[in-house]
Image: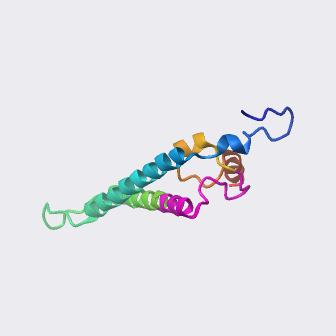
Amino acid sequence: MNKQIIGDHDTRPAPEDLRLTPDDLAALKENLHEQRLFREEQLRQIAAADAPCSGGPGRRPSAARAEVRVKLAASARMVLADVEAALRRMAEGDYGLCHLCRRPIARERLAIVPQARYCARCQQVREAGR
């Protein structure tokens, strides 16, 4: 059951509506492990693409392709770090709580972004402040 309050008051779901069940946690943990494997493989492939070309001496990838690989690798490392941090929070029993307001993060948000550190409201505030 959701809290329905009119005006400027908090209309987020009540905390009991957001609690993660053991089944939720198991599914989210599996998703995080799959994401970790995907990012690790992505980084291996990027590193392999950066290895010297076997097409002969002097065969170098274009500067534009190299730049794309650098950015892809940075993004993959960032997501991998977020995934590993989420798995640590899960192991410590702190998973699913917003780092700012300490309220539970909505189950639906975690299903989409299982490594989320912030509830949707706090994430919006952070992004608006940039």
Q: Relative to residue 93, is residue 28 depicted above or below? A: above
Where is residue 107? Give x, y as percent. 60, 42
> Where does residue 123 sit, x and y in percent of width and height?
66, 50
Q: Nearer the viewer, residue 10 or 28?
A: 28
Left or right relative to 93: residue 53: left
> Looking at the image, which residue is at 54% across and 48% down?
22
Q: Quadrant of residue 62?
A: bottom left
In the depicted structure, whether residue 119 falls above or below residue 2:
below
Q: Which residue: 43% across, 57% down?
A: 76
- The front one of 43 and 11 is 11
Q: Is residue 44 left or right of residue 98?
A: left
Magenta-tinted stretch: 81-103
Which quarter of the rendering shows the N terminus? top right
Quarter of the figure that contains the C terminus: bottom right
Q: Position of residue 12 (x, y in %)?
A: 74, 40
94 or 123: nearer the eye?
Answer: 94
